[in-house]
């Protein structure tokens, strides 16, 4: 189930993309074999960047919202994938409880919940929305602009199971990334499936662990299709306990930034790439209090620190200390109406079910687009006459391009399955 979509990127197809297209049968067989050995995350979304010379994932979200952005033509795929996923996990499932973010109040997020409810209802489940927010003490019904409404109900726990009043689900779908930690009400559930598992939340998850797993996946995939895995894998490093309030803390980070930039320059020289390399610095635990920084030279860190100091420290002690991920920056060649864009691939179980473009008119090709001012444009299905055909001249079929984005998205999803296996506390317990 790999849909083909219309993309915004035109122009000649590059060598990497051609290699992926030519290797389609081998790639699909490889994925089938991988999914026989590894369990995919229940759902995820992946931000992909296409620099022309490099095609790589830059962020993998295991609690994706934004399901309301996907085009209506993609709904059947999402429903089919939901059916397949639920059938594997709990074939006799009747009731599904969706647990949203605690601050589930803005219209965009509520529309996302309504779409998730629709997908699982059409997959044959009774669906309710249960909030674990201490502020939700009774059912709250909220109207949506399209005339629909959704009701949030307080989650209750009884005899080791959770649900809402008069509703006992066998499956709980988390749409809450647990930034604030895993609440006790979700722990040690009896005979209920919690998807994704608690250790997928940012209370325990680390971007550096995912990057390491993706590096492993990309090496094996690169060997499969005969390409340098760097072409699909952002180089990375981790710097622990960075204290942005001290010169010594920033100096340690600067040293690592300089070393990573050196590695990227070496690869650029190898491939004759003229673009100046850059690094993206992020909180390793996805902490939203820390801004995402773009660094082209280690010397920039001092001025960046002065700029971000108050933001980094927001809601934190004065000496804000972070573990940070240093990730090779990947340019984006995508454009929509002259605005910089990047594709976001949505998956459920092991299937690509849709995607959209994140667009930001105020950002440059080397900047983070997931920022205030961004907008979203659904990707549409390609017309049948535009579907990939054997022997089509390279670059003549733009819809082919999203196949590559789907491959990269699935590689990131596979890395996430490796990551969840490696960090599973129960697996460690029984080792």
Image: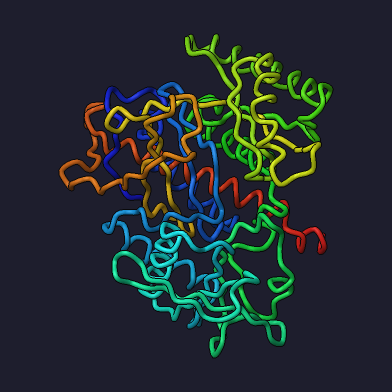
Q: Residue at x 41, y 52 (%)?
A: 352
Q: Is residue 121 above or below residue 53?
A: below
Residue 373 location in percent, x, y?
42, 39
Q: Is residue 132 above or below residue 311?
A: below
Most distant residue in the bottom direction: 166
Q: Quadrant of residue 165?
A: bottom right
**Horizontal side of residue 302 vs 126, given as left or right:** right
Q: Which image quadrant: the N terminus?
A: bottom left
Q: Residue at x 22, y 29 (%)?
A: 396
Q: Is residue 390 above or below residue 86?
A: above
Residue 357 location in percent, x, y?
36, 41
Q: Residue at x 52, y 80 (%)?
A: 139
Q: Which image quadrant: the C terminus?
A: bottom right
Q: How many marks?
A: 0
Residue 381 location in percent, x, y?
25, 49
Q: Residue at x 50, y 33 (%)?
A: 368
Residue 376 location in percent, x, y?
36, 45
Colour mode of the rendering: rainbow
Q: Nearer the viewer, residue 371 or 124?
A: 371
Q: Is residue 366 above or below residue 417?
A: above
**Horizontal side of residue 97 vs 76, given as left or right:** right
Most distant residue in the left direction: 385
**Horizontal side of residue 279 vs 145, given as left or right:** right
């Amino acid at each position: 189930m790999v849909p083909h979509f219309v993309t915004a990127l035109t122009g000649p197809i590059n060598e990497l993309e051609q290699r992926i297209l030519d290797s389609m049968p081998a790639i699909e067989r490889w994925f089938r074999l991988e999914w026989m050995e590894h369990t995919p995350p229940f759902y995820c979304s992946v931000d992909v960047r296409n620099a022309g010379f490099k095609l790589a994932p830059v962020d993998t979200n295991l609690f994706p919202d934004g399901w309301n952005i996907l085009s209506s033509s993609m709904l059947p795929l999402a429903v089919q994938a939901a059916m397949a996923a639920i059938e594997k996990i709990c074939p006799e499932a009747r009731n599904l409880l969706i647990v949203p973010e605690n601050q589930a109040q803005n219209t965009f997020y509520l529309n996302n919940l309504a779409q998730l409810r629709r997908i699982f209802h059409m997959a044959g489940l009774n669906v309710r929305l249960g909030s674990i927010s201490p502020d939700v003490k009774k059912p709250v019904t909220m109207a949506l602009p399209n005339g629909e409404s959704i009701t949030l109900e307080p989650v209750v726990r009884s005899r080791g199971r959770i649900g809402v009043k008069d509703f006992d689900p066998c499956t709980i779908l988390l749409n809450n990334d647990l930034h604030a930690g895993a609440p006790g009400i979700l722990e040690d559930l009896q005979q209920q499936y919690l998807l994704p598992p608690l250790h997928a939340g940012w209370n325990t998850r680390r971007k550096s662990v995912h990057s390491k797993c993706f590096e492993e996946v990309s090496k094996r995939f690169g060997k499969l299709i005969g390409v340098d895995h760097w072409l699909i894998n952002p180089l990375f490093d981790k710097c622990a306990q960075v204290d942005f309030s001290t010169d010594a803390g920033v100096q340690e980070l600067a040293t690592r930034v300089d070393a990573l930039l050196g590695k990227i320059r070496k690869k650029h020289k190898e491939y004759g790439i003229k673009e100046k390399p850059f690094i993206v610095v992020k909180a390793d635990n996805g902490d939203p209090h820390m801004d995402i920084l773009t660094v082209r030279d280690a010397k920039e860190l001092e001025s960046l620190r002065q700029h971000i100091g108050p933001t980094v420290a927001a809601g934190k002690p004065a000496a804000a200390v972070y573990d940070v991920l240093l990730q090779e920056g990947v340019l984006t060649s995508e454009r929509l109406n002259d605005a910089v864009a990047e594709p976001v691939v949505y998956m459920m179980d092991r299937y690509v079910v849709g995607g959209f473009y994140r667009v930001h008119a105020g950002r440059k090709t080397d900047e983070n687009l997931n920022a205030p001012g961004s907008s979203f444009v659904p990707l549409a299905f390609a017309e049948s006459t535009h579907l990939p055909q054997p022997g089509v001249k390279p670059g003549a079929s733009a819809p082919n391009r999203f196949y590559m984005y789907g491959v990269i998205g699935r590689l990131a999803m596979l890395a996430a399955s490796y990551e969840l296996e490696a960090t599973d506390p129960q697996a460690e317990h029984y080792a």
